Structures are given as structure tokens and as C-alpha cells.
Amino acid sequence: MAIQAKIQTSVQPLTDFALQDWDLGGEHPAVIVHDVASRPRPHGHVIVFANEKGGVGKSTLAFHTAMAMCDAGKKVAVIDLDHGQATLSGALSNREATCRLLKIGLPTPRYVAVSQPSGACLSQEIARIGSDCNYVLIDVAGSDSPIARRAIAMADTLVTPINSSFADIELLGQFDATTMRLKRLGRFARLVSALRGARVERRMAAADWIVIPNRIRRSGSNNETMIGDALERLSQIAGFRIGQGLGERVAYRELFLFGLTHLDLKRIPKLARVKATAKHEIEQLLADLQLSAVGDDQADLFEPHPSENLWIEERPLSLTA
Ligand SMILES: Nc1ncnc2c1ncn2[C@@H]1O[C@H](COP(=O)(O)OP(=O)(O)OP(=O)(O)O)[C@@H](O)[C@H]1O
Ligand SMILES: [Mg+2]
């Protein structure tokens, strides 16, 4: 029997999700959206990287997205809401250290790690570093919190990376292990849906929600096919788009340590560069965000260029001054 046929749905479409059914505890979505709407909005497009599941690649994707935008000449502000781990702001600080070590200049976004998790502080920091930026990127910690909810409520585009296991998509949707029946939407999908619904009730546009499979292994296993089908089904009910995704690559980890991406290699002749494919994946990620649909005046910069396939070898990097 085809896997697609095994996936049955008995949950209500999220268009029917009523705010009075709010079952996740904490502040009500309407209160959160009211708070967000009452504060000044940045001029630029707000892209939020969020998933209650930890370690799925939020900071990695936010980093590569920010770097690709800077490389394309955009003004970008990065807000790190994970003050404890400070993964993203740490990588950007490493980037500055790399520049000092190599005595070079690299395009770098403005960035800040928000230490006080309140709506007022978030709004204040966005205004301080992002008021004239084309894009404001917010990296959210991997857990539910009032500040995470505010960031999601603020998103024009919401990016949710996931790894390809049923344990990871549990927060989007819960499936019966034997029948593959979708039992109910996961708590993160319900949270996002409720916040999007609360925005629409205030006549604000709902966030464009895109789920990005991350650390894909091209094995073509039965499990990956089942995950793909499950995601497809969920996307129709929860109202998200699915991006092509990023493969499992050593380079994403290695370059991150130095605050670098493949796009910097053309500016650093000392680094080895040989063929690989991650550059195209990041271009595809930017294209999948479909920023042209929300008013980027130079959206063609984010089209993928598959013919230009410059990349580094999948081996550890070393830097010397
Ligand atoms: N495509 C990839 N290929 C290889 N390694 C990856 C990839 N994406 C992320 N990683 C690695 O996975 C780990 C977790 O990634 P990351 O810190 O971006 O996740 P996160 O969702 O931000 O985590 P947290 O919830 O803790 O904030 C890191 O070690 C990162 O280098
Ligand atoms: Mg993170």
C-alpha cells in the first residue's frame, strides 16, 4: 500500500482553530499580538527562526541567511533571543575576531543578544539596531516562552527548521505509529496557528510560514519517504510551505566556528576552495523564502544560480594570519 494512502487525517484544519480553544497555557495569543501591535514596527521585513524543538538548526539557518543577505548588499540586523547559549551572536563575534586575525573586512550584520526577555526590550533593540535595515532576523531559543511567542507574533516570515525524524516533527503533528494516522497537531503548530489567527483578527497579515528540512541525508530510506509524506500532509492542514532544505554537511559546522560562510571564501584567498554544493543550498533557501512576494526591491539577488558552484572541501578548516 502506498505510504500516502496510509496517512489519514482526523484533525480539524487549522482554519477552524478558534482562539477560544486556546489550550497551551500562558498568555493568550490575542494579548501577545495586541502587545506586539502596540509597539513601533521596524521598517524592514522581519524573519523569525523558531521551533520549540532544540538543536534543529535555527541558529545555523539564521546565520547563513543573514550572511547571504549581507553579501547581496542588504542592511541586516540580527537579534539573538537565546541569550543563554548565544550561538548566533557568538558566531558573529567570531566573525569579527576572524576579520581582525586576517586583517580583512567582511560584510557583517549589526547584531545584539537580548538579555532581558521582555517585549519592551525586544522592541527597543530592534529599534536601536534595525530601524533602517532591509531585514531584521530573530533567532529564537528552542523552548516556549513569552518572548518566543512575541517574536513569532512579530514575524512577516517564520522559518522553522526540522530534522527528518518523527520525534522532531512531533511538535508539528503527532502520528499514530502503526497506522500513520495524524492524531492531532503538535503544540508548536497550534501555537503558530493561534498567533497567526490573532494577527488576522487584528487585520494584520498572517506570517508566511515555511518549514525547512535540515541535515537531510540523501539515503532515500523508507523512513525519509514517510517523513516527507507526513510533512506534506501537515503543511496543508497547518498552512506552511516546505523548502527544499539543507543537507548534512561538515562545512556548516566548521565555518560557523569562524563566523564564516562559503560566500566569504572569495574574499579570503588563503582558504582552500574546491567543489561542493552547499552554496547552492543556501541560495535555494533564500529563494524558498520568496522575499520578492513581500516587497524586496532587489529580490532577483536571491535567485539560485546553479551554474556557479564554488565551494570548499568537506574537511576541517584552519586559519592563520
Ligand atoms: N545542515 C547541517 N549540517 C551539519 N550540521 C548542522 C547542520 N545544521 C545544523 N548543524 C549542527 O547542529 C547543531 C545544532 O544546530 P543549531 O545550533 O543551529 O540548532 P538550534 O535549533 O539553533 O539549537 P537550539 O535549539 O539549541 O538553539 C550545531 O552543532 C550545528 O552546527
Ligand atoms: Mg539556536
Image (cartoon, grey):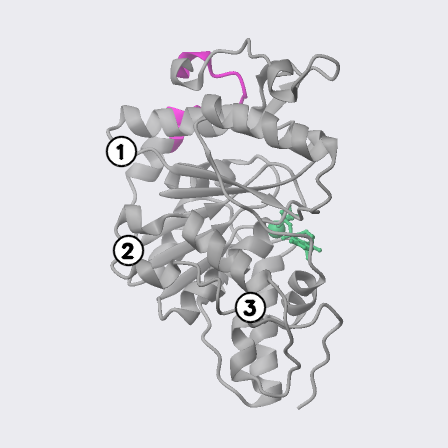
Q: Are marks 2 and 1 in contact (CB under 8 Å)?
A: no
> Which quarter of the rendering shows the C terminus?
bottom right
Residue designated by label 1: 204
Foreground mark, 2 or 1, reads 2
Q: Are marks 3 and 1 in contact (CB under 8 Å)?
A: no
Alpha carbons under labels 3 and 2: distance apart: 24 Å
> What is the three-letter code of the residue carrying label 3?
Leu
Residue at the (58%, 87%) spot, across then down: 269
**Alpha-carbon span between mark 3 and mark 1:** 32 Å
Check if residue 20 falls in the magenta segment: yes
Residue 172: % across, % down: 58, 28
Quickly name the residue at label 2: 296
Please state which of residues 305 and 282 is positioned toward the viewer in this rendering: 305
Displayed quadrant of residue 158: top left
Is residue 128 in view from this perspective? no
Q: Position of residue 77 (x, y in %)?
A: 41, 61
Is residue 150 rendered to the left or right of residue 264? left
> Could you classify mark 3 by the number of other residues whose Cα lies within 10 Å: few (under 14), some (14-19), or many (20 or more)?
many
The local crowd at label 2, few if under 14, some if 14 to 19, many if 20 or more residues have their Cα within 10 Å, is: some
Disc number placed over residue 92 in the picture, else none: 3
Q: Residue at x 62, y 49 (%)?
A: 57
- Rendering coords of residue 235 (x, y %): 49, 28
What SS does tag 3 mark?
A: helix
Q: Note whether 276 is above or below 229 in the view shown.
A: below
**Which quadrant would residue 90 be assigned to in this image?**
bottom right
Residue 22 in magenta stretch: yes
54 is higher (above) or lower (below) than 77: above
Q: Earlier in the sequence, mark 3 or mark 1?
A: 3
- Residue interval drawn in magenta: 18-32
Left or right: residue 217 compared with residue 129 = right
Residue type, mark 1 in image: Met
**Tag 2 or tag 3, which sits nearer the N-term?**
3
